[in-house]
Image: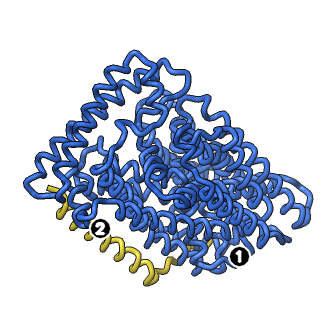
Chain colours: A blue, B yellow
Amino acid sequence: MEIASKLHEIDWIILSITLLFIVVYGTYVTRKNSNVTDYIKGGNDTKWWTIGLSVMATQASAITFLSTPGQAFHSGMGFVQFYFGLPIAMVIICVVFIPIYHKLKVYTAYEFLEGRFDAKTRTLTAFLFLIQRGLAAGITIFAPAIILSAVLGWDLLSLNIIIGFLVIIYTVSGGTKAVNVTQKQQMIVIFLGMLIAFFMILSQLPEDITFSKALTIAGASDKMQVLDFSFDLNNRYTVWTGFIGGTFLMLSYFGTDQSQVQRYLSGKSVRESQLGLIFNGLLKVPMQFFILLVGVMVFVFYQFNASPLNFNPKVKDEVANSVYAEQYKSLETEHIEIENKKKILLVDGFQDNERTQIQALNKRDLELKESARVIIDKIDETAIEKLESNDKDYVFIHFILNNLPRGLIGLLLAVILSAAMSSTASELNALASTTAMDLYKRNIKEEKSEAHYVKASKWFTLAWGILAILVACIANLFDNLIQLVNIIGSIFYGNVLGIFLLAFFIKYVKGNAVFIAAIITQTIIIITWYLDVLPYLWLNLLGCILVMSIAVLLQSFKRKQILTNG
Amino acid sequence: MKPEKYTWKKEYTIVLVANVIYLIAFYLITNHFTN
């Protein structure tokens, strides 16, 4: 493939050295894990900044760095509102969740539920987590691999196996400590790479286009609308969905998902864990804002440079071999004409009286892109391989490969792969810990040594790693596996959060009521999803409300029965 | 299990105030660059 040749030797060297250094260093410094506390809770000696970076690295997958700039390129900065609930969730977790988890010295979030309710509720929530996160781990590998294989011509299966294998090496060997240590380095690579990319984009704008003028150009094309106060339910990103939905979602994710809980359970003290989350609460919104700003600057860059009508590299060949070739060609011709007109208007910088003309040209360009997407979707219906018409995942990588200098391309690819590895590592680490502590240790009768459980945890990490690679390798066979994984997440997340909220806040409710409520809720949620009554994102909220209400009702009913029977 | 006593620390106020400041900055950016 043409673009693959753009990877120079120096890119390969930087990419390989960065990734191998992280893997070798992570494996070497954490090779001595003698007990379960070391392996699962990182020896309980993690400092707050490591926790903070680790929490951020777990959430920021490769898709964050591939997709978010593309999101800003098309729709502007509004996506940042999605994170508005995060600081509120961080504070709630610091005040309520962390002190209890630390006091009870739990290894997993689900272990707490046994003390509060009973063993069956613990097993049920652990099981729900394993199904959901086990599939998601495969997608964390697959999602960037499919994009990189499309643009670089790399073999998809090999890429899945390489990413998965690199993660398995240090996660199996060093457990939580290895995940924390490597995530610190991965975040340094990520921050460094994104900062350099940002300044490289600015340096490639025409000489008289300053940063301030670039923002004005972006503003004239509606890319700088950060806040949206409208109450439109069809609009996914508004201030209100960010605060209400965001708080709810982030509370589920950071408070009850073991892949995050395990990060702050490794803290040296309650205070270190709390400060780690506060660090995340301070930096997350500006970080997302910055990644979106990179995308907006890419948009400004393409106001002065040629861009394809659709950034997905597979589209060109597929369209050329279809009956829509002529129709697509005429869209491309008009797109180029618009680009040329914009260049003439913007060549002397942006003047206020040019705003209307720019807006009209952008509007027409959007219409062309939409028509192109319709054509691509039609071709997709008969294509053997899936042809993605939404090109937001391809915008930033297209920019990187075509416009950044040698060496920097290697560093940016290291950013993307580091992000994929850091998220996957946390997932495998959490899956193994939950399997080892909540299912295996909890259910075997005889006493075993610490070394036995460390060994078992390592085997579980390896097994989950292999399963994640397998899911990644077969993901391409299914049409909408990424969406399916999100749906599965929505089906289980609300129920699990509801159980935790009951545990923390409604002391009156006991184990049996919660367990029955959870089973009833899960059945209702699956039926609701099957009947397609609600958009799947709402299943989160419904699940949480249902399990809490049913549990309270059942408990009240039981209490009444006891009182009546004397 | 005994009912927990929840304690408020100044770091929580800092993180919430910082995010309110971000929000004000976003409001100013939106107003300045959007018609």
**Residue A255 placed where, x, y %?**
55, 62
Q: Tag 1, which secondary structure?
A: helix
Chain letter for the residue marked with disc 2 in the picture: B
Q: Residue furthest top?
A: A323
Q: Of A469 and A430, which appears nearest the observer?
A: A469
From mark 1 to mark 2, how far is it between C-alphas?
Answer: 35 Å
Locate residue A309 relative to residue A224 in the image: left or right.
right
Q: Is residue B9 above or below residue B33?
A: below
The quadrant of the image that shows the C terminus of chain A is bottom right
Q: Is residue A176 above or below residue A78?
A: below
Q: Are marks 1 and 2 on the same chain?
A: no
- What is the three-letter code of the residue carrying label 1? Asn
Residue pointed to by mark 1: A44
- Secondary structure type for disc 2: helix
Residue at the image point whose x is 43% and y is 53% from the top: A403
Q: Tell me which corner region of the image, top left, top right, bottom left or bottom right, holds residue A291.
A: bottom left
Callout count: 2
How crowded pointer 2 is (Cα within 10 Å; few <14, some 14-19, many 20+) is rated as some
The reply to whether residue A29 is visible in this rendering is yes
Front residue (pair A53, A510): A53
Q: Position of residue A188 (x, y in %)?
A: 56, 70
Residue B23 numbered mark, or none: 2
Please name whichever residue, A311 or A373, is drawn nearer the observer in this view of the structure. A311
A276 lies above or below A75: below
Amino acid on which disc 2 is placed:
Leu
